[in-house]
Amino acid sequence: MALEIERRFLVSLDAAEPWRAHVAWQQRLHQGYLSAGASGFTTRVRHDGAAGAWLTLKCAAAASQAVRHEFEYPIPAADARELLALSSQQLSKWRYGLDLPDGDWVLDVFEGSNAPLVIAEVELSSPDQPLAIPPWCVLEITGQGRLSNAALAATPLSAWEPLERNHLLQRAGAPSSCLG
C-alpha cells in the first residue's frame, strides 16, 4: 500500500525568494479534481503541459494528518487533457524540486486565482523523521484542509473572505499591493 508522509509549509513572499538558490528542476502543472470529499478522498488528474500526465487517488491513512494513502498512475496526455476538460475544480502552479536535506522537497508557486500563494512540501520516510525547516518556511500548514490543493481548486485564495486572505498573506510577509 502506497503511503505519502508529507509536511507542508507556507513560504515567505520575500521578493528575494531565497528558496530559488535550491532549485534543482521545475515544471508547470495543471491539475483538476474529479472528486474531492469531506472525508479527504480525492481523485486528481495532473498534466505537465507536455507528455507527463498522472491520475492520483488520495485518502486519509492514520490519525496523523501528515500520512495519507496515495496511488498515482501515469496516463496518456490526451486522456489527462480530456479529464481536465471535465473537471470544474482546477488550479495551475509552477513546481520546483529543491535540493534540501531530510526528505524530498518541492515548492509550489500558485498562479491565477491562487496567486501569490507559495507552499513548500516535504515527503518523509516516517512521520517522526527529524527535519531541518528552512527559515523561509514561515508557518506549518500540514493538515490545514483549506490549504490543500483540492480545497484551493474548489475555493481559490481570491474567493476567501478578505480578512482571512489578508491574514494568511500577512503571515507570509506579502507586500501591501497583494492585500486588499
Image (cartoon, rainbow, N blue to C red):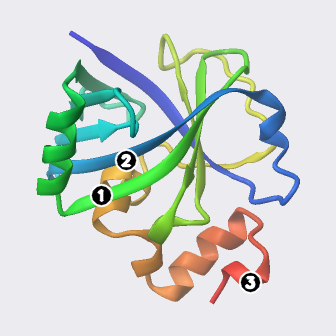
* Quadrant assignment for the C terminus: bottom right
Residue density around tag 3, few if under 14, some if 14–19, many if 20 or more, within 10 Å: few
Query: Tag on residue 103?
Result: none
Q: Residue furthest right?
A: 16
Q: CA distance from mark 3 to mark 1?
A: 25 Å
Query: Tag on residue 90?
Result: 1
Residue density around tag 1, few if under 14, some if 14–19, many if 20 or more, within 10 Å: many
Instruction: Provide the residue designation for mark 3.
Output: 177
- The foreground one among 76 and 139 is 76
Q: First in sequence: mark 3 or mark 2?
A: 2
Q: Amino acid at mark 3?
A: Ser
Q: Are marks 1 and 2 in contact (CB under 8 Å)?
A: yes
Q: First in sequence: mark 1 or mark 2?
A: 2
SS at mark 1? strand
SS at mark 3? helix
Residue 58 visible in rendering:
no
Foreground label between 3 and 2: 2
Q: Amino acid at mark 1?
A: Gln
The correct choice, above or below, for 138 with respect to 168 in the image is: above
Horizontal relation, residue 113 to residue 84: left or right: right
Horizontal relation, residue 94 to residue 69: left or right: right
Residue 79 visible in rendering:
yes
Residue at 46% from the left image edge and 77% from the top image edge = 158
SS at mark 2? strand
Instruction: Provide the residue designation for mark 2.
Output: 30
Across and down, in percent, residue 102 comes to 67, 15
Q: CA distance from mark 1 to mark 2?
A: 7 Å
Horizontal relation, residue 66 to residue 8: left or right: left
